[in-house]
Image (cartoon, grey):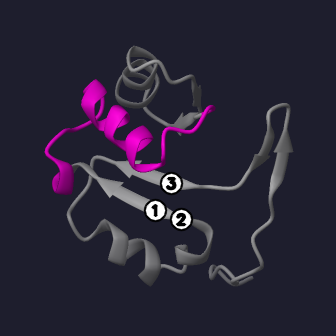
Amino acid sequence: MSNEFSAKPRQFHWGSQGCINDWWALSNHVPELHAIVKSVGLGPFIDEVISSANVGFEKPHPAIFALARELAGNPKEVWMVGDNQQADVEGSRAAGIPAILV
């Protein structure tokens, strides 16, 4: 079994508010995160990458979530899906963004 991702056409998922069509990565990571995402084959699946090293705020600071929302064009509905209770869930909720802990 291969560990490589294959580039497939984007699949859009319909929710109660319409089509979910933008997938962003928001991470407390190095400035090179965008290049890393591409190099591991995730580029076709991620629309935009925001790294704390490039913006001056780390999660859970509300400013990084506000910046991400602004850069996304202030969409009506935004969700944070993350694996860290404090940085991802509590941080996004403090910024008014619902979160899912995985």
Query: In 3D space, how far apart are the residues under numbered discs 1 and 2 (Cα atoms)?
Result: 4 Å
Q: Is residue 98 above or below residue 39?
A: above
Query: In 3D space, how far apart are the residues under numbered discs 2 and 3 (Cα atoms)?
Result: 6 Å
First of labels 2, 3 by sequence position: 3
The residue wearing badge 1 is: 48
Q: Tell me where residue 45 sits by quadrant.
A: bottom right
Q: Does 92 sit left or right of 41 as displayed? A: left
Q: Residue at x 39, y 20 (%)?
A: 95
First of labels 1, 3 by sequence position: 3
Q: Tell me where residue 65 sits by quadrant.
A: top left
User: Which amino acid lies under the numbered mark 3 shown in the image of this protein?
Assistant: Trp
Q: Residue at x 58, y 34 (%)?
A: 78
Crowding near the residue tagged with mark 2, few <14, some 14–19, many ≥20 C-alpha atoms within 10 Å: few
Secondary structure state at the residue bearing disc 2: loop
> Is residue 7 highlighted in magenta?
no
Q: Residue at x 74, y 82 (%)?
A: 1
Q: Is residue 24 above or below residue 37?
A: above
Instruction: Where is residue 8? Give x, y as percent.
Output: 76, 80
